[in-house]
């Protein structure tokens, strides 16, 4: 499952990088929780929460149905 999550994250990276940010996979728990770290300009950005939910989580849950949620590490 970790490899499929990485592939999903690769789909959102271009948009994040266009704004000077990125996302890093920290872990995938046995329960299906995906923990990520926003980096670069995304780290500390006031819109980081929305980016995580509306961008990263949306794509990961679509591409990896067994993932239950995405949260910041």
Image: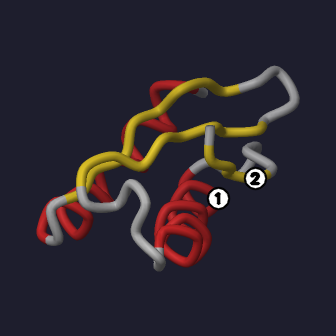
- Above or below, 1 against 36 in this view is above
Q: Residue furthest right?
A: 31
Picture residue at 15% right of the left edge, 61% below the top: 20
Considering depth in this image, is 60 or 65 the residue closer to the camera? 60
| C-alpha gap between disc 2 and disc 1 | 7 Å
> Residue tagged by mark 1?
61
The C terminus lies in quadrant:
top right
Picture residue at 42% right of the left edge, 49% below the top: 38
Picture residue at 47% right of the left edge, 77% below the top: 46
Q: Secondary structure at mark 2?
A: strand
List x then y, in percent, for residue 32: 79, 35
Considering depth in this image, is 15 or 4 the residue closer to the camera? 15
> Residue tagged by mark 2?
69
List x then y, in percent, for residue 25: 47, 32
List x then y, in percent, for residue 11: 30, 57
Q: Are marks 2 and 1 in contact (CB under 8 Å)?
A: yes
């Amino acid at each position: 499952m970790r490899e499929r999550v990485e592939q999903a994250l690769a789909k959102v990276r271009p948009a994040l990088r266009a704004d000077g940010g990125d996302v890093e996979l920290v872990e995938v728990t046995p329960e299906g929780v995906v923990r990520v770290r926003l980096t670069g300009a995304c780290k500390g950005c006031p819109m980081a929460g929305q980016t995580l939910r509306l961008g990263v989580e949306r794509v990961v849950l679509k591409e990896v149905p067994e993932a239950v949620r995405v949260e910041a590490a």
